[in-house]
Image (cartoon, rainbow, N blue to C red):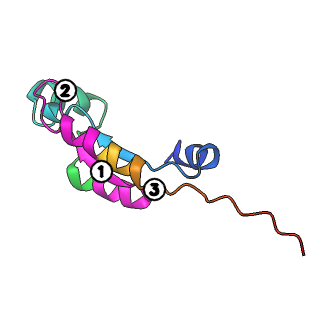
Amino acid sequence: EKWTPEVKHFCPNVPIVLVGNKKDLRNDNNTIRELAKMKQEPVRSEQGRLMAEKINAFGYLECSAKTKEGVREVFEMATRAALQVKKKKKKPCLIV
């Protein structure tokens, strides 16, 4: 929510792919304990999807570089998002 307006201002036609990283830590007891000390908890998949909708992202995926889960899909979605962007057609010069 904090950075979205700035990104949309400076990069208005660039699609956003929201990625939940370190998916493997979501169920890690040590991580949960450390987050609880700060009155936090791991982000749930549903929270990520809702945020993606809220910021009008191209999509939302989760991955873990440690386990390699979802990494390829992140790059595939980023590629699809980049290829979907329509380049503005130049308007021809008309003299009336």
- Extreme-right residue of the structure: 96
Determine the secondary structure under disc 1. Answer: strand
Alpha-carbon distance for marks 2 and 1?
A: 16 Å
Where in the figure is residue 39, as x and y percent of width and height?
A: 29, 36
Q: Earlier in the sequence, mark 2 or mark 1?
A: 1
Q: Given this view, does label 2 or label 3 mark the residue nearer the observer?
A: 2
Query: Marks 3 and 1, Cα distance to the nearest angstrom?
Result: 11 Å
Horizontally, residue 96 falls left or right of residue 11, namely: right
Q: Is residue 90 above or below residue 76?
A: below
Q: Is 92 included in the stretch rendered in magenta?
A: no
Rendering quarter of residue 51 = bottom left
> Over which residues does the magenta segment extend?
49-76
Q: Position of residue 36 (x, y in %)?
A: 23, 33
Residue, disc 3:
55
Q: Quadrant of residue 95?
A: bottom right
Three-letter amino acid code of the residue under disc 3: Ile
Mark found first going from the N terminus, 2 or 3: 3
Read off the residue under disc 2: 65
Residue 62 in magenta stretch:
yes
Q: Nearer the viewer, residue 68 or 45?
A: 68
CB-based contact (under 8 Å), mark 2 and mark 1: no
Q: Which residue is mark 1?
A: 60
Q: Is residue 88 above or below residue 82?
A: below
